[in-house]
Amino acid sequence: MVLYNDLDETKKIALSNDLDDKLSVQKAKLNLLLDCIEKTNQTIQLFDINLIDEQSLQIFNKNFKLLLELQMNLDYLSYNISNLTYLKQLLVNIPVNYANENQIKTYNKLADKCEKALYLTNICVDNIISEYKEAPQLDIDIHAAQATVPLATDVSSQNNKTHDESISQTPNTITNNNVLLISEIQNKVFLPYSIKELNEIFKQNKKYNSLKEVIEDKYILPLDKYKNPFISRFKEAYSLMRIRENASIIDSINLALDVTFNSLLNPAIITACKNLDELDIYLDCLSSNELDKFDIFEIKYEIRPSKHIKPKGV
């Protein structure tokens, strides 16, 4: 792959073929990793936080660690593919029998860099694929678990047949709610919503008889859903990207990994965000310690009162 002297037609063809072969190998490995990432992520997404036990948690942690390593190696492969593509472009632009010293030097420098990166990447990818094949899997009913769909704002996934029941029969007490309430006292999370959103869901789904039923089903969630913030941040961020933003699996995983380790981010806030822009605005306010500037919706907490133990002898 490296040039040592002037380039003749035979050598140029051989080098070009060699680059094509290396590109094909890297692209094949990339596609294999994408498949592994998708299946590992599926295991993580279907993990039921309410059925958590020590063994399941260990399996989850191993799969999450595996996902991080797969994603890292995916970046390595993408880097190699980019460099090999550029290297071939350099080769195409080097004239046969008239290559100058600078052209050869530029080509050789990148070629040497590529050779080292390819060697290390191939070892890493082969190791992570072996690790993937040996990774323990959760005992999950995939078809049943896949019935779990994210937040109600994804109206397109609802039944497309509208029903004609009059919404005007809904109690007048239902109005726009611009508050995210995270209540330890009630052990529930109350998500913000607008009447427009409720109406859209109501019209698109026959199972609801009133807007109140929509609220109770879609906008009031058990607090236990977030009892493991680490797992919840990953799953809620992935859902936001994949479902509400219609992003690719890889882009969705990237965002999820970005926020998973942010211990200051309550995962219920991710659920309350209607789109990525809202989450980005909140994260900006959070990082700058200016949460008072976040005005998309209000965030309130109901905390259980702490128990005070009366000292003996008092």
Image: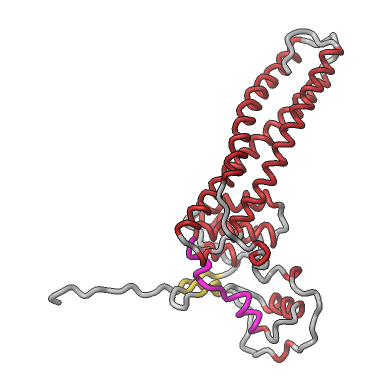
- Residue 231 lies, in percent from the top left, at 53, 58
Against 167, is 94 above or below?
Answer: above
Picture quarter with the C terminus? bottom left
Instruction: Give how far across and how far down residue 118 sits, in percent.
Output: 66, 27
Name the image quarter holding residue 80: top right
Position of residue 144 in the picture relative to residue 231 (left or right) = right
Position of residue 153 in the picture relative to residue 272 (left or right):
right
Q: Where on the picture, by quarter, is residue 11?
A: top right
Question: Which SS does the magenta portion mostly show?
Answer: helix
Tell me the quarter of the image containing the N terminus: top right
- State whether residue 242 is above or below residue 132: below
Residue 120 in the image, given as x and y percentages of width and height:
60, 28
The answer to whether residue 290 is visible is no
Q: Nearer the viewer, residue 279 or 55?
A: 55
**Count of residue discs:** 0
Image position, residue 145 (x, y; %): 64, 65
Viewer-nearest residue: 187 or 295: 187
Quick check: is 221 in the magenta stretch?
yes
Q: Which residues are magenta?
A: 212-228
Q: Does the rendering let one see residue 209?
A: yes
Q: Residue at x 62, y 35 (%)?
A: 125
Q: Residue furthest left?
A: 313
Q: Which residue is rendered at x = 67% and y = 18% of the image?
A: 109
Vertical placement of 104 versus 73: above or below?
above
Q: Residue at x 85, y 13 (%)?
A: 10
Horizontal side of 98 relative to 53 (left or right) equals right
Identified at 76% across, 77% down, the residue is 204
The magenta stretch spans residue 25: no
Q: Which sits in the foreground, 42 or 165? A: 42
Colouring method of the image: secondary structure
